[in-house]
Amino acid sequence: MNNIFKIIYLIIFIITGTIQVNSAEKIDYLKTDWSFKSLFGKFDRASLQRGYQVYKEVCASCHSMKYVSFRNLSEPGGPEFTEEQVKAIAASYEVNDGPNSEGEMFLRPAKLSDKFVMPYENVKAAQAANGGAYPPDMSVLAKARSGGVDYIYSLLLGYEDAPSDVKLDDGVYYNKFMYGNKIKMAEPITDDLIEYGDGTPATKEQMAKDVTTFLMWAAEPHLESRHKMGFKAILYLIILTVLVYFSMKKIWSRIESEV
Amino acid sequence: MSDHEYTPKSKFGKWFNDRLPLLSLASHLTDYPTPKNLNYWWTFGGILTFCLITQIVTGLTLAMHYIAHADMAFESVEHIMRDVNYGWLIRYIHANGASMFFLAVYIHIFRSLFYGSYKSPREIIWILGIIIYLLMMAAAFMGYVLPWGQMSFWGATVITNLFSAIPLVGEGIVNWLWGGYSVDNPTLTRFFTLHYLIPFLILGLVVLHIWALHVPGNNNPVGIDIKKPSKDTVPFHPYIVIKDGFALLMFMIVFAFFVFYTPNILGHADNYIEANPLVTPAHIVPEWYLLPFYAILRSVPDKLLGVIAMLSAILILAALPWLDTSKIRSAVFRPLYKQFYWILVADVLILGYVGAMPAEGLYLLIARVATGYYFIHFLVVLPILGFKEKTMPLPLSITEPVLGGSPMASAVKKKESLN
């Protein structure tokens, strides 16, 4: 038995080592408590709904979210808007469809099955409108940056006046959490920029937290069912392991040998 | 082997077995005499079989939904993650399964190194194992390219570019591998094809690996030859089956933890950015399990020599049964080898660490020293050690103490129970 603990220590050692090495760049991100991080973590529904509002009213004017569909907004584990609400949200967008029986393309209101409508036709158009910088698609953004949600949260709150020795070109801003500190996105959120539907005071921190929570959900829409299933799966495995352990002891007791 | 004595009880069974001796094979597998002192380091063979089958099953499922096209691969992976029923589960099992597979294979290889399992008469098992390991690396590398993220694309570019170091024909070979003048759609489709093929090659080699194992039988922690079957052995079923099963379940708990709670921690964040040939990531790093070899590659200033060093680092393992001149298998009875063994383990871990760091300054120096030591271990230390080392007396059998009640006997017993 001693041996198996050695093996487990070794595995833990290698894995933690790997993780340490992977996240070698040590940056002190701003801390906030994420409801979805623990073993039983779930999204804060109200925060997701507010986060969607921030995304829609602020981010979506430049950032696409092309892998998320309107229907996802009403699915369990997400913001869980009612289907009527989502239908109304979708209908407020127009999508290009066709060709119809006359061979013409036409515009129609978006449906639940449509993907989020992109602010620009294509990457080039997005770059042209943003001083050459492409506002990244936000579908998996929370997984596409080392530091993840902590990084995004910090970045949103990391705008500062540039130190005197840093020269900034036109349309370039100083952000202490950006790689190289220079960012082409102007500070996107300020206090009371929007008015929350549920009356929550729209402070900078609140908006940053809400929208980051929303981005995490967008990147990982099945996070809640993953956590739930993980708990069941591991509990099942542990019970089975204990049963198999005692069976093993019993079988090996037939011969004089240690297991 | 005792298969020949097996006769099925039923008439049909006998009729069938005379034509295709499947029942004899099953009987051989269940009765297979296994040393009874195998410790838990020996359970990783079974764990690896589990890993391979898991990868094949999840991989087949993913292939039903994945689209191998440069414009659609990234999107199809997101489709799997979002819209395919339990697609996220299957993909996370497959992605983390690769890491778990390598974790297990490294333990399996280092177990072999410690207990001298590669020595006569098991050289063929060992060499088959090295070929499997090489194929695993190829499969893992190509699999990592398939999601068509930034690390996929640039990893593929860096690794395939290594072939350009070959004099005269290098450039031609690289273009031939790419199917064009850069990593692009033809590269992706061929990598997908090969990624699909290699696991089945591995499966075939695993059958040979196990077949070759069943000829001399398992090595064991004491490393001495044992009579089979005897009171030193137990039948594979139920004794080893249940023990392997127990270890496998422990392994699955670790595996499940990764899949359900930190599925992306072993990957690189950049691979969630779609491949872009115009933007190079700040650091291009391979997956953790390839890092030691990446460090060896970068520690040599010349590209061609670096590639040669990296390949030799793996191929030198195939010559190990002849480089290690000691007749004693288990490190338990080789006090000096045991120390060098742990130095090698540390050396490989250090190589892995510096492989993840930028190749400059102190890291580069450490990488060079560690690379040098790696080769010294196999080319100098092991051959000399076999002649110089004063080994401890071996016991006569697993169960019986050393003849004449040498003081070592109790030590062996203690060591065994520790294991």
Image (tube, coloured by chain):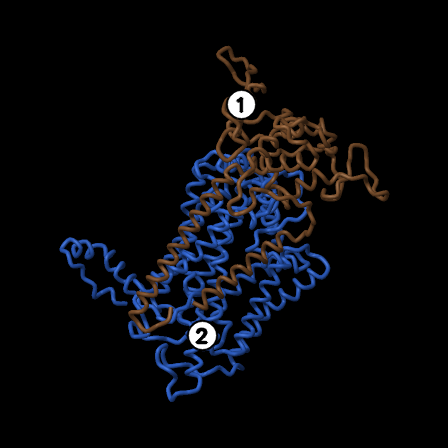
Chain colours: A brown, B blue
For mark 2, give the secondary structure: loop
Expressed as whole percent of the image width and height from the top left, the position of residue B6 reads 21, 63
Three-letter code for the amino acid on which mark 1 is drawn: Gln
- Rendered-image quadrant of the C terminus of chain B: bottom left
Mark 2 and mark 1: Cα distance apart in space:
72 Å
Q: Are marks 2 and 1 on the same chain?
A: no
Q: Nearer the viewer, mark 2 or mark 1?
A: 1
Nearer to me, B201 or B270 = B270
Q: Label 2 sits on what residue type?
A: Arg
Q: Is residue A2 above or below residue A33?
A: below
Residue extending furthest toward the right: A164
Whether residue B32 is situated above or below residue B338 in the rendered picture: above
Label 2 sits on residue: B329
Q: Residue at x 56, y 37 (%)?
A: A44
> Which residue of the protein is positioned furthest toward the top in this rendering?
A102
Q: Return the chain for callout 2.
A: B
